[in-house]
Amino acid sequence: MKVVALLTTGLRSSIGSDALLREVAGKPLLAHALDRMARVDKLDAIAVVATDSPADAGIERFCKARGITCYRGSGEDGLGRLLAALKAEAATAGVVIAADAPLVDPATIDHVANLIRLTDGMVDWIGTPLTKSYPLGMEVEAFTVAALDDSSRRCLDPDERREGTTHLRSNSRLYRLLSVTAPAEQHRPELDFSVTPASMPTIEAVIRHFAGRDDYGLTEMIAFLDARSKGAKGTARV
């Protein structure tokens, strides 16, 4: 089984080049995400999938400069973009991470990618989004290309096509789904590590705290934020 990971824009949010290419601790947020993905040894290849909107032009330039494959397609057809990219890579399974998730845990990617390999076609879709147990920005999903192809042929709803894998993971009567839930120490759905104006201070604080590393996991991130929160409350009481 050839498993290809896709870092995607335009599926969960409309965040474009300006936000994703914002530099924190010396490199763009997009680079932080790609460096964390590169630590996963269960992946055969990594590519970026962007929309053909002018807002994503900077992402394509970044990928060319870094030597990373970048596929672009209609912003109205996220499902079609994913499928075209995976077929171009001759993949039999895909792993999808949103580009607005620069702190995604390599261990979670590794776990989901390993599950899609081990099940070897017995499960169509595996991922974290079905159950709200992980923080936002930790979403990872994997699926067989055969299942995504079937989903593309069946899915006619423009909203579902825009959001990529929605049709696949929303139809348990058609596809075999496996939900991955967070372990107890990572069950923090109230936290947000996705790129939004409100969460950027948190993202920047985490990256700067672990500066020089791209292997830190979600448990370490939670411990850092909890310690910082306790410290702030203690200071406020003085």
Image (cartoon, grey):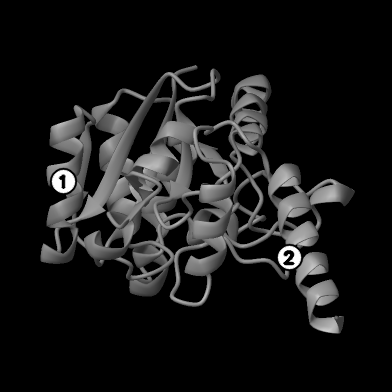
The vertical placement of 189 against 42, above or below, is below
Q: Nearer the viewer, residue 191 or 126?
A: 191
Disc 1 crowd, CA 10 A, few/some/many (<14, 14-19, 20+): many
The vertical placement of 38 against 131, above or below, is above
Asked whether, in this view, residue 84 is left or right of residue 24, the answer is: left
Residue 189's tag is: 2
* On-image quarter of the C terminus: bottom right
* Mark 2: amino acid: Pro
Residue at image position (81%, 76%) is: 233
Residue 177 screen position, x and y as percent: 67, 46
Q: Nearer the viewer, residue 11 or 100?
A: 100
Image quadrant in which you'd find residue 159: bottom left
Residue 179 visible in the current orientation: no
Query: How much space separates mark 1 and mark 2, taking CA atoms?
Result: 32 Å
Residue 121 visible in the current orientation: yes
Residue at image position (40%, 36%) is: 34
Image quadrant in which you'd find residue 157: bottom left
Q: Secondary structure at mark 1?
A: helix
Residue 11's tag is: none
Residue 176 screen position, x and y as percent: 66, 44
Disc 2 crowd, CA 10 A, few/some/many (<14, 14-19, 20+): some
Residue at image position (59%, 29%) is: 113
Residue 60's tag is: 1
The vertical placement of 101 against 62, above or below, is below
Residue 116 screen position, x and y as percent: 61, 29
Q: Nearer the viewer, residue 81 or 62?
A: 62
Of the two numbered discs 1 and 2 on the same chain, state the one appearing first in sequence: 1
Q: Secondary structure at mark 2?
A: loop
Asked whether, in this view, residue 188 is left or right of residue 198, the answer is: right
* Mark 1: amino acid: Glu
Farthest residue in the bottom direction? Answer: 237
